Image (cartoon, rainbow, N blue to C red):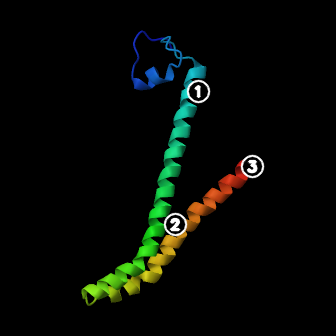
Amino acid sequence: MSNKRYKNDFHKLADLNNDRNITEQELAHYEKLVELENEDNKASAQRKMAWFSLFGMIFYPFVVVIADVIGLQNTPTVLADIAPTYFVSVAAIVAAFYGKEAYVSKKGK
């Protein structure tokens, strides 16, 4: 693929030696870099989701207590009623994340 001008930024980034010719090797190398970057972003997002879920699970009881202390009459009851569903859901999210991490680490070895 020989261009006098790059069609877009993808072509400019893929041309590793800046000779304005994008070889199959350069294209494959750049595609692999993009794939690795996307996988890294996905892993980071999953890790953040798991940590956010864990913090939510830890602070949930405090929200119930604070609602009771503030004097909200029905809120502690409602929060206590949905607690079992919430904790099971969050536990499933966290278990799936750490299960996947354990599987990937074993598979890689």
Residue 28 is marked as 1
Image height of 38 relative to 83, above or below: above
Q: Earlier in the sequence, mark 3 or mark 2?
A: 2
Element carrying mark 1: helix
Q: Earlier in the sequence, mark 3 or mark 1?
A: 1
Q: Indicate the position of residue 105 as horizontal and vertical percent values.
A: 68, 53
Looking at the image, residue 56 sits to the left or right of residue 68; the answer is: right
Around disc 3, counting alpha carbons within 10 Å, would you say few (fewer than 14), some (14 to 19), or many (20 or more)?
few
Q: Amino acid at mark 2?
A: Ile
Q: Amino acid at mark 3?
A: Lys
Q: Amino acid at mark 1?
A: Ala
Estimate the spatial distance between the alpha carbons at disc 2 and disc 1, rounded to whole Å.
35 Å
Element carrying mark 3: loop
Q: Earlier in the sequence, mark 2 or mark 1?
A: 1
Name the residue rendered at 38%, 80% in the picture: 62
Where residue 6 sits, quadrant-wise, is top left
Image height of 11 relative to 108, above or below: above
What residue is shown with label 3? 109
What residue is shown with label 2? 93
Image height of 35 relative to 9, above or below: below
Estimate the spatial distance between the alpha carbons at disc 3 and disc 1, rounded to whole Å.
25 Å
Estimate the spatial distance between the alpha carbons at disc 3 and disc 2, rounded to whole Å.
25 Å
Where residue 76 sits, quadrant-wise, is bottom left
Name the residue rendered at 71%, 52% in the picture: 107
